[in-house]
Image (tube, helix red, strand yellow):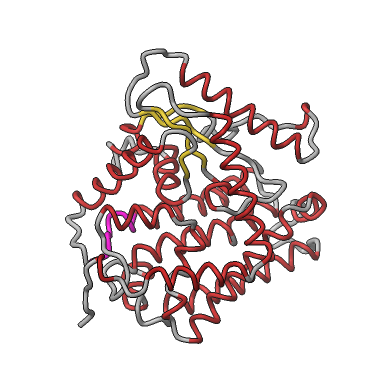
Amino acid sequence: MTQILPSTQYRCAMTESLVVSQLLNEYSNISAAKALAGRRIDQARAALGSSQEEGLDVVAFGSLARQEVTRESDFDYLVLATNLPEDLETAANLLTKANELRRSWFIEEGMTEKEVPGPGASGVFGRAVGAFDLIDQIGLQQDTNHSLTRRMLLLEESVSLMNQDVYDSVIQTTLRRYLTVGSTRPDKVPRFLLNDVVRYWRTISVDYQAKAREGIDSSGLRYLKLIIPRKVLFAGTAMSLLLCGREGFHTAEVPDLQDQVRMPPIDRLVQGYPVAPPPVQDAMREVLSVLDTYLGCSGNPEWRSLVKQGRRGADANPPEFLAMCDAGDRLQQGLEVVFFDWDVVAARSRQMLAF
């Protein structure tokens, strides 16, 4: 029987965290992306300042929150509200500030004013949303694709840029809702939350195929984003939840899960590296190698232009697109070893991910 340790008795957590940090530093593009993300987060916080209005935060998502920023990365953001501000212009002013920051980063990378795309083209980002709308209807009819997306990305890839207290409060409330409704024990996987994480991964996979069929966006770059960084995002979150209650790891309690939320997805995925057996460590390294290669290419405008011409299943494709598809296959194989061959999570993975 697996021994459950209290959160205060984690085995040498600081040492193991250092091992993971050193591991990630071996990959130059991952390391550079983390450094650039850190600089941009600092710039954003300085530009936005501290909130003069209680109950509002500007939250960043996407590559900035994942710490996978390259020169071509966009800046996805929301104004998150826990109550209606006294000045109704406050949220609009914050959106304007965030968009100006986004515009300045694009221009810094060589775009002209006319080339800078507008924010929030998908309708998910670039606007103000109420926390209640994200939490109240989990899984019900009014839980739209937009509310699911915002809620999942809030838990999987987000960072506060202005009012940490507001952000922490929303994260805690969201996690507590999942754990309470799911009647989750500290030593068990929070299955209500895991099922929603799986639902979101399936939703974006279906969304890609549906849009490709309609000719809305079938570019090779969008496909590569799905099979590499977005798959790593899903895998990192799933790993956090599958490790709950395992010896030496965290529990399925709000403080521990909040610590997991604070970690970038790739850190969550490889957090067990120091204690994993060599074959699983090798598989984790393969995943890191693929992501590192992808990040090294994705900041190159010429590469992005070439792979956009790629199409899954097409008779002829750019070699750059085919090479990254092969890398995506290696990432998939590595994840299969990590989730299905590592005895710490294998049984849970088969039970909760495969069926």
Indicate the position of residue 47 as horizontal and vertical percent values. Answer: 58, 30
Is 352 placed above or below 175 here? below
Q: Nearer the viewer, residue 354 or 303?
A: 303
Q: Nearer the viewer, residue 303 or 292?
A: 292
For the N terminus, the image quarter is bottom left
Indicate the position of residue 30 as horizontal and vertical percent values. Answer: 63, 61
Is 73 placed above or below 279 here? above
Residue in the picture at 45% in, 78% down:
274
Magenta: main secondary structure = helix
Q: Based on the picture, tell me whether residue 191 belongs to the magenta stretch.
A: yes
Q: Is residue 307 left or right of residue 224?
A: right
Indicate the position of residue 332 as horizontal and vertical percent values. Answer: 55, 71
For the C terminus, the image quarter is bottom left
Q: Residue extending furthest bottom?
A: 278
Is 333 placed above or below 189 here? below
Residue in the picture at 59% in, 61% down:
227
Name the quadrant containing residue 136.
Answer: top left
The magenta stretch is 188-195
Q: How many marks?
A: 0
Q: Nearer the viewer, residue 111 or 24?
A: 24
Q: Based on the picture, tell me whether residue 289 belongs to the magenta stretch.
A: no
Indicate the position of residue 115 as horizontal and vertical percent values. Answer: 77, 32
Residue in the picture at 67% in, 59% down:
295
Q: Nearer the viewer, residue 249 or 231?
A: 249
Residue in the picture at 58% in, 58% down:
229
Q: Is residue 245 left or right of residue 43?
A: left
Name the quadrant containing residue 81.
Answer: top left
